[in-house]
Amino acid sequence: MFRKNLQEIGASETLRWLGFLVLLGHIMTFLFVMPEGILFLSNTLNPQCWSYFPGCELLHMPSKLFWLFYFCFYLCVSLLGLISFYRGQIRRAFICLISATALKTLFLIIDRSFMGNYHFMHVLYCLVYIFFPQKELSLKILLAWFYLAAGSLKLNIEWLSGAAVGGGPQFLPPILQMWSYAYVVVLELIVVWGLFSVKPWIRWLSFAQFFIFHLVSFYWVGYFYPSIVLSMLMVFPFSWINPLPEKAIPRQAIVLVAILGLFQVTAFFSEKDPAIFSHRRLASMNMFDARSVCAIGFQLHQDEKLMIFNPDLRPLGVRVRCDANIVLNQAKNMCLESARIKNFKALDIAMLSKRFTDDGFAEVYKISDVCPLIEKATYAQWLWGEI
């Protein structure tokens, strides 16, 4: 398998340049997560664990120097791979890409503070590039699924009204702002099929719309997300310039998209709103389809004292700070540290959440004396946030 992948990449100029761009995405990842990444991973007192890895504190090491070395090694491997792809040293470049992807995947798994679709999409793209046959077609199919999933999430008043992104560019009249939100849905659900058209002018017109859309999105989300997506999107024009003979769609790509689609549909048809009960989106896309608002309250019972406070989740991203599992994880960390809290008796937690456009809040958690429940919780309970 290793040899076949090398042969496919070495025989395609398109794949060599895509490999170059993928590794450029790893370098941008380093710039994006530093230096906060060191602080996240060295935080052993209050680590932010994914629900599928509630014991992530075991991999959080307090040494900041260790994580500095880790990220510098990640950068060096990515740079070496980038240079190797440019020089046509395919074997070395491919090994560097595998190593960089493994290093990135590891720190994403260890701490949920890195949560973001830009990382999820980039890692998936890397894995398809590394392991799948007919890489160009497989990557195109994956990109199309990204857009279709993102567009389907935006079919709600939260996105179409602009509430999800906090409003549009002020230099546009309100009516054009409203139309622009609807245009994005049309772009991701309909225009995306134009990228596969047999007519060159339709393909290039469709690509131009996506290219402009991602350039404009810098206004809302900054440089990192659009840059990652644009680097992945280049598979389309590169393959049009150097076309390969048509082949059947690879089964691996079909299976991957089917699995991802199953996760997406499961969250969509959940009896609870996945934008609020966010653990239901554990393995699905999580776009700017909603802006969650939440109220969190912790009550710490001591001998003759009751302390009421809200965990400070402001340093976390907008889509993370109202994450139900993050709140439960905060409670778990406090319970683990209960021996150090003077006269600790019990901890009660409560969380209300809603979409920005909703009239009322939905109760996510209201649990008295949560620590014994956390201590006895099964893995399935952690996974689904049903403690």
Image: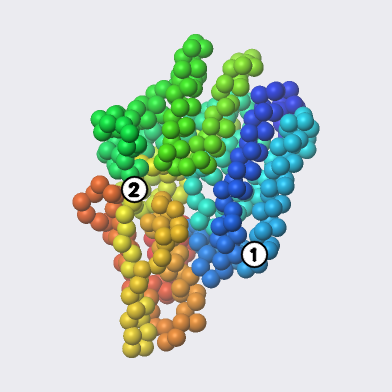
Q: On the picture, is 312 further left or further right than 74?
A: left
On screen, residue 39 above or below 253: below
Q: Say which residue label 2 marks.
A: 291
Under circle 2, the secondary element is loop
Q: Quadrant of the C terminus?
A: bottom left
Q: Residue at x 35, y 36 (%)?
A: 169
Q: Earlier in the sequence, mark 1 or mark 2?
A: 1
Under circle 1, the secondary element is helix
Q: Amino acid at mark 2?
A: Arg
On screen, residue 296 above or below 19: below
Q: Residue at x 53, y 32 (%)?
A: 230
Cα–Cα span, label 1 and label 2: 33 Å
Q: Position of residue 266 (x, y in %)?
A: 39, 43
Q: On the picture, is 95 further left or further right than 206?
A: right
Q: Say which residue label 1 marks.
A: 64
Q: Residues within 10 Å of mark 1 (few under 14, many from 20)?
A: some
Give 364 or 382, whichever is nearer the viewer.
Answer: 364
Within the image, what quadrant is residue 171 found in?
top left
Viewer can see residue 266: no
Q: Residues within 10 Å of mark 2 (few under 14, many from 20)?
A: many
Q: Quadrant of the N terminus?
A: top right
Q: Amino acid at mark 1?
A: Lys
Give 189 or 72, whichever is nearer the viewer.
Answer: 72
Q: Position of residue 273 (x, y in %)?
A: 32, 48
